Image (cartoon, rainbow, N blue to C red):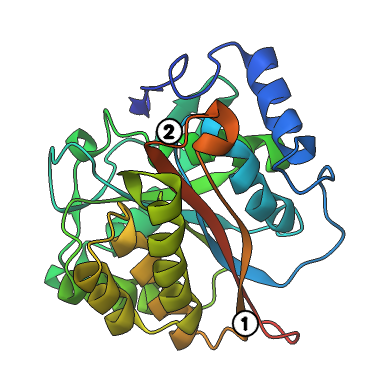
Amino acid sequence: MPRVRRAAVAGLFYPSDPNELREAIRSSFIGPLGPGKSPPLKSSQIFGMVVPHAGYEYSAQVAAHGYLEASAVDAEVYVIIGPNHYGIGSGVAVPASELWNTPLGDAEIDSSLARALLDEGSIVDMDDGAHWREHSIEVQIPFLQYLRGHVKVLPISLAMMDEGTVLELAELLYRKLQGRKFFIIASSDMTHYEDKVKVAQKDEIAIKAILSRDVSELYRVLEKYDITMCGYGAAAVLMHLSNRFGAADVRLLKHADSGDTTGDNSSVVGYATIAFYRKEQGL
């Protein structure tokens, strides 16, 4: 029997009923903060994206801007990198499990690619413990299942997000993804639990750094301005990979915050979807 990573936050971050979950995702595309159209998109050169990972009621419409673009992509593997909020398990971890369960079924984990990342005495470990409670990767998978049906994913959990570690991981992925049809998802919320004005100001600084594709600049501004972006390491991996693979452009698709849905602007969390695009000729 295959090892299965069971859904940990179904019924908490998103509906546990399959029909309700499909409706929540469908609605995110056409809601007031969403892109205003339903997938699939006819064509897109999107290479990867930064997307939020809060409860669907707060951030799914922001994420939908990226997933609309991703609906035009048919990748062999979706590499999903997210922060380890609980600090459980290895610092950089792929699952030992072979399947990842959600209410929409089982996504296949690319175990061969996961094992390949363990080569060369790398910083990556195979550790289910780093994934078993974590929501940052889990909330992305139903979107992919909604768009593609069967998908193959490579979840990577990051408890260690210093610049040296993420650059080493990015270089390892660069070597192992050669010749593959892949898509990169960097899961991150932006500034946490400040008033709406401060969150907007800090998020603008962080987003500008991401748009520059300068990893060192992102780390510099996060420290200088005390920006509590939780998945900065995941975003940095995507930034470095986009540079290594020669991506042509990066754009902010949507920025909002939790106050836009709750009406409480005194303490909000920022959400951004930022898309990285391939050259027209492809990579």
Question: Is residue 152 found left or right of 100 in the rendered image?
Answer: right
**Residue at left offset 74%, top offset 29%:** 27
Q: Quadrant of the C terminus?
A: bottom right
Determine the residue positioned at 70% across, 57% down: 74
Q: Say which quarter of the image contains residue 23.
A: top right
Q: Is residue 215 left or right of residue 220?
A: right
Contact (Cβ within 8 Å) of mark 2 with mark 1: no
Q: Nearer the viewer, residue 72 or 136?
A: 136
Q: Is any atom of residue 238 visible in this view?
A: no
Q: Secondary structure at mark 2?
A: strand
| Residue at position x 41%, y 49% in the image | 189
Of badges 2 and 1, nearer the viewer stands 1
Q: Quadrant of residue 224?
A: bottom left
Amino acid on which the number 2 mark rests in the picture: Leu
Say if 192 sits above or below 106 in the image: below
- State the CA–CA distance, disc 2 to disc 1: 33 Å
Q: Amino acid at mark 1?
A: Asp
Side (left or right) of 29 relative to 145:
right
Sort mark 1 into few (<14), some (14-19) or many (20+) by Cα contacts within 10 Å. Answer: some
Name the disc covering residue 77, or none.
none
Q: Is residue 52 above or below residue 212?
A: above
Residue ID for mark 1:
249
Q: Which residue is mark 2?
A: 99
Rendering coords of residue 272 (x, y %): 52, 55
The crowd level at tag 2 (other Cα within 10 Å; few <14, some 14-19, many 20+) is: many
Point out the image quarter for the N terminus: top left
Residue 192 locus on image (x, y percent)? 33, 45
> x, y percentage for residue 144?
61, 42
> On the rendered structure, is 129 left or right of 101?
left
Residue 55 visible in image:
yes
